[in-house]
Amino acid sequence: MNDPANDSSSLDDRLPVVVVGAGAMGKEWLRMLVKSHSAAPVGVVDLDLDLAAAAVASLGLDIVVGASVVEVAERAGAQAVVNVTIPQAHRIVNEQALRAGLPVLCEKPLAPTVAEALRQVALADLTGSLLMVSQSRRYFNHLAAYREAVGALGSLGAIHAEFFHADHEPGFREQMDHPLLVDMSIHHFDQLRYLVNDEPIAVRCSSWNPPWSWFAGHAAATAEFELASGARFVYAGSRATPGLQTSWNADWHVYAERGAAAWDGDTVVRVDAEDIPFNVPDRREGIEGSLEEFVVSLRAGTTPQNEVRANLLSLAMVEGAIRSSERGGDRVVLDDLLEESLAQAIVDEQRDDVAELLRSWSSAAEAITSPAWGSVPADIASGGAL
Ligand SMILES: NC(=O)c1ccc[n+]([C@@H]2O[C@H](COP(=O)([O-])OP(=O)(O)OC[C@H]3O[C@@H](n4cnc5c(N)ncnc54)[C@H](O)[C@@H]3O)[C@@H](O)[C@H]2O)c1
């Protein structure tokens, strides 16, 4: 593959972006963007200016650095923003960018709560700009292969996913109440929604912190989701697991009408059923795949898989699981959670235009069914390739 930094013809076509947040993941994005054929970094924003300057210098870049997304974007001639700040800062940064007419690709989780996420759906609607959530775990070629196999197995009985890791990443994660569910399971819950042609409707969950855990909050959980078809998604996870660890993508097992299929979260897909062919595509993976879909959607006017509205149910799975755990494992209906979150969003919203739009919605469930941006769903535009 050519290095775009040395390829002036491809540089002209790259989308100029500002990266907001120069922490651990912000640097990952910058490293990827330097080599990307889809977009180029033209500015970096962080509240910590020294950190932003050091990130830029470490990559040998000579680009604009500052503390204000709008100012840096203007000075640098950026056409979009990649938001890699902490979850608590996502909404405010997204609001500044969208109101300045800049589309945003925002790291997961979109917000700490569904109520805060709904305010961003309304904001995207008002500004008419694309707000996409980067759920990078969707972009794995073996997950796409597994999805193809699972799709051919007929009616599903259950989908099991297990995630066992020992994560030592000091910072906001180790202080969160629910570091597993909020910061990590969002990936696996969103992968479930990519994997099956079905949606979650209710959840029962139990979460806790193992006695040796270095996390302040609950590093472990089990959850059972009911899907609209009647199938179950059974999840178990821990971020404080000293041995026998799984892939970052979790370890998956599905049984269905015509057989069963498993994925180790990396490169092994196994199918125990007759005549179930599947192909492993050759596409960009992880954050590179997510960036590519963002840029293609912007240019073609198509709706990406994780346009802000489509992402809301993944976030509702997280909050529903937390709510159930806090209520001793009671069944939480996600539609109820969505409507209560809309009421909360209206109370919390300070901007009149956003509050007025939220009040005009007859229901949150209805508001998240049609995309705020783009006319053609990406999977249709791509001929089902996504
Ligand atoms: N996709 C993945 O696999 C993956 C992996 C790791 C992290 N993430 C996500 O990336 C995001 C960042 O995680 P991280 O590990 O880099 O965190 P971090 O704490 O290392 O970095 C966050 C940075 O954001 C800056 N910041 C905070 N508020 C800001 C604001 N209002 N304006 C500008 N800058 C601000 C902080 O100063 C800090 O430098 C999180 O949402 C996290 O969940 C995703």
Image (tube, rainbow, N blue to C red):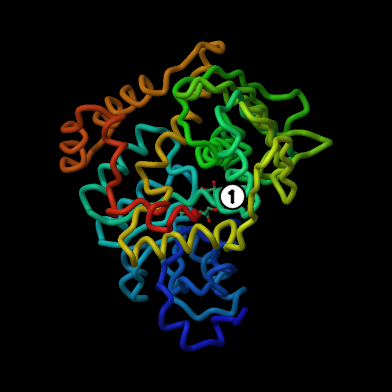
- Where residue 277 appears, x then y in whole percent? 65, 47
Asked if residue 125 lies left or right of residue 36, the reply is left
Count neighbours of disc 1 (C-alpha within 10 A) and say few if under 14, some if 14 to 19, many if 20 or more: many
Quarter of the image for residue 6 reads bottom right
Task: Depth check: give the residue in front, 316 or 377.
Answer: 377
**What amino acid is labelled 1 in the image?**
Ala
Q: What residue occupies the far front of the structure in this picture?
A: 275
Which sits in the foreground, 196 or 213?
196
Q: Secondary structure at mark 1?
A: helix
Name the residue beneath numbered marker 1.
Answer: 144
**Which of the 4 quarters of the picture holds residue 168?**
top right
> From this viewpoint, which residue is outermost toward the right?
243
Answer left or right for 41 relative to 338: right
Residue at image position (48%, 61%) is 291
- Looking at the rendering, in which quadrant would you find the N terminus? bottom right
Q: Is residue 347 above or below residue 375?
A: above
| Residue 67 sits above or below residue 127 on the image | below
Assess mark 1: CB under 8 A from ligand 1?
no
Is residue 93 something one can see in this rendering?
Answer: no
Q: Residue drawn 38% across and 52% down?
A: 380
Q: Residue at x 43, y 44 (%)?
A: 110
For the question of whether residue 98 can be seen, the reply is yes
Relative image position of residue 366 (x, y in whole percent): 27, 31
Give how far across and how far down residue 120 sits, in percent: 32, 43
Answer above or below: position of 376 versus 225: below
Name the one closer to the observer, 286 or 349: 286
Q: Position of residue 344 (x, y in %)?
A: 30, 26
Residue 120 in the figure: left or right of residue 42: left
